[in-house]
Image (tube, rainbow, N blue to C red):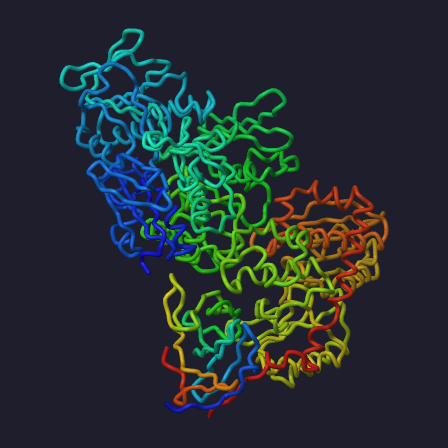
Amino acid sequence: MEQKKKRLVVVGNGMAGIRTIEELLKMSADEFNITVFGAEPQPNYNRILLSPVLSGEMPFQDTVLNDWSWYEENHITLHTGKTVTKIDRMRCTVETDDGIVVPYDRLLIATGSNPIMLPVPGIDLPGVIGYRSIADVEQMLAAAQPGKRAVVIGGGLLGLEAANGLSLRGMQVSVVHLCEWPMERQLDKVGGGLLKEALEKRGLKFYLSRQTDAILGETAVTGLRFKDGEEIAADLVVMSAGIRPNIALAKSAGIHCERGIMVSDTMQTYDPKIYSVGECVQHRGQTYGLVAPLFEQAKVAANHLAQYGRMRYEGSSVSTKLKVTGIDLFSAGDFNPVAGDDELLLQDAARGVYKKLVLRDNKLRGAVMYGDTVDGPWYFQMMRDGTDVSEMREHLLFGQMHLGDSGHGAKAGVMDMPDTAEICGCNGVCKGTIVNTIIDKKLFTLDEVRAHTKASASCGSCTGLVEAILANTVGGDYSAKPSKKPICGCTEYAHQDMHKTIRERSLKTIPEVMKALEWKTEDGCHVCRPALNYYLLAAWPGEYVDDSRSRFINERVHANIQKDGTYSVIPRIWGGVTSPAQLRAIAEIAERHEVPTVHITGGQRIGLYGITKENLPKMWAELVEAGFVSGHAYGKSLRTVKTCVGSEWCRFGTQDSTGLGIKVEQMTWGSWTPHKFKIAVSGCPRNCAEATIKDFGIVCVDSGYEIHVGGNGGVKVRVTDFLCKVSSEAEVLEYCGAFMQLYREDAHYLDRTAPWIERVGLPFVKRHIVDDAEGRAELYARFLKSQQYSQDDPWKERAEGKEAHEFTALATIV
Amino acid sequence: MNWIQVGNLEDIPRQGSRVVKTATGEIALFRSVDDQVFALNNRCPHKGGPLSQGIVHGKRVTCPLHSWVIDLESGEAISPDIGCAHRLEVRVAHGELFLEAEAGVCKA
């Protein structure tokens, strides 16, 4: 049995190699016998956190990602402190410096990188140290006696972190840098200048535009001489002039290398049995030194090792954050503008804030931020998504909070919040709990944080905050958000793939989708099944048979489940207009069923609460008898059309808002949408129906009807965007149907219109709904077509016995 | 062990659930996509949500109240949540369902 397993050998016991194994074990735990070689004596630790260890803010144990027992539990043979010196590609074996020979069927090279040691005299003296491993840190700490002098060569990210750490240990630290300002790869001149000032205030001394000529000393380092002849004293020299992919082993085995080990999009080297990931690889001309791309590579390599053979690595864009406590700095993308680019600048010397955004064709190309980096991840995401920012351009520099976005703003100063600050209101999770859980459980992804703390696992509106905490806790240069997130653990496919894939490949049922797209689970889960059910429903109206087993309970039984397992019943009251007869009918039904709570809802209707499931069909039968239909108050569907009394009564009313509201509701009721959808019609700009916080809002004016879209009155209020003005009710209906259809066909499942519009941009909506009359007519026609199949009252059907098994017990045992 | 017949396999929809009422509470019977049947207390260990109303996937059910995922074979919550909905014995013979006789609801 054991013999039949394939043998995977991993050279390199670092973050990229081990992450690949973790991803592989998730997909197919039993396929390989795994052997890992690590040159360092430790198990896999988080190299990003070396700086906090150096500065004394974190003990080494806290950086260990996989302790010894992890290797044991997963039956991985681990050789630490052993260097692989030879790969025999003919025999398919690797050999270590002390003579161990291990055969492989697949080999993964994850040898990482080495610090570049400048070729100057004295480089071999004791007291000259690179900065790459925990051993380097230990050496530095041994030498770091208070009052002694350290010189760091290289004013890049890592160099400054090392300098800061040594300074916190009480040393006098100088930084020598070749360029005019520190971190020139991540910062422009202004940002670099601000950083330099801040670090000088903390006691660092800078020697800029200086080149090192020699390291001085007889038996140990005593100082440094620059090209210009000046000499400075030093008891310790830290080399941090960059890293170089560690390709010696691969090269000696004849594997094609340039700067790094050359790999394809499947992370394969030129030898198809040999894969490579991490800092040692060169992919499409790029090498990477940050963790996020390595993790993306690990995922792809694991996918191919497990023979799923589906994913491709297409390169990463990276962002950086300096991990020096108290200094906020963020940069991403291409921040040096070229001809034709626009530059947005904000500089506030007194507050110590500097922001620069570079735009090309209305898209973000790069960002440099100093002093206030809260919006860094947001800019970065827009950069990766290629979001059109023309609509928000005037406010862009002020950050996400100033956009009235829906649900993910207000990240300001998350790290300044006290530990007791409640982050997730739904599940009552405080900041301290999240931070401690991330540290204790060594969490890296948003999903892990959700699973362990429940923070942002319910309504999701605090997702941004939680991500900010995660990014700040695990170390700033880690960015947790790939631009395409898989729908759930069952698949690699993301929401953005689904509409198109289902239509193009003509997939007609959930099992068909799962088969064609190689779902990893037999029948999905509670996350992907409702999503697929929606996408299929939207793609094939009238043809696709709704799968009730893939509906959340509320939509399956057409009532809202309450905390005690009873349900609420909310009949539709068209446009909020009712009558004594209707009210009487509801009153009598409520009395007859001894309804514990009768409540006027926010959507101008009447809610009956505390109904047991068995009673639902009976109550519905009576409501149907009295002329009511389902209010769909439970669904990702049209909820209500709220109205004011308009010109019929109001002395300010300009149009018949109630009559129009009823027409709109009669056209749209019963439609399934990616998330709930609310409409309102106000009779004049006083806007008593609050139309400007609805998904689709109509504000009547004397000369016609203003149409507003993308509003939200929920967790995070978002005011609608003005779409256009039309002159007749018929046009309102057409624009409304077309807009809903565009939303249905384009938005991801569980996207409200507000975040959807923020993602695709208002110009996208205008292009389809306002500018393109033909396209609008087609959208409207498709909307009406799908409505033909969705306006059978679900209550009536169930009152007549459909799905009776949902409402009755199987048996009663006394 | 004594067995009580509580219905037929076909009474439960695939990927669905039905409830058996007992003097001490409800028991949820689940039918997986491959026609296996499981029985659990109809109470989520988290806040008592009715598991029978959840979405059944693989050999798991997701509670409708706060999306805890419960393993149907053991009744245990899926990590990192901790809790147990207590499993009962159920058998399918010739399409008929039998539940263990002392099917009182276990103490949670």
The one nearer the camera, A306 or A579, is A306
Q: Position of residue A715 (x, y in %)?
A: 56, 54
Furthest residue toward front: A90
The one nearer the camera, B5 or A759, is B5
Furthest residue toward left: A219
Left or right, residue A656 beside residue B23: right
Tag count? 0
Residue A237 occupies quadrant = top left
Q: Position of residue A597 (x, y in %)?
A: 59, 76
Left or right, residue A163 beside residue A526: left
Q: Position of residue A775 (x, y in %)?
A: 79, 47
The one nearer the camera, A608 or A502, is A502
Residue A616, relative to residue A561: is it above or below? below
Q: Is residue A82 visible?
A: yes
**Residue at x 70% of width, y 42% of height:** A764
Q: Position of residue A763 (x, y in %)?
A: 70, 40
Q: Is residue A328 visible?
A: no
Image quadrant where one finds the N terminus of chain A = bottom left
Residue A74, relative to residue A95: is it above or below? below
**Residue at x 41% of width, y 50% of height:** A23
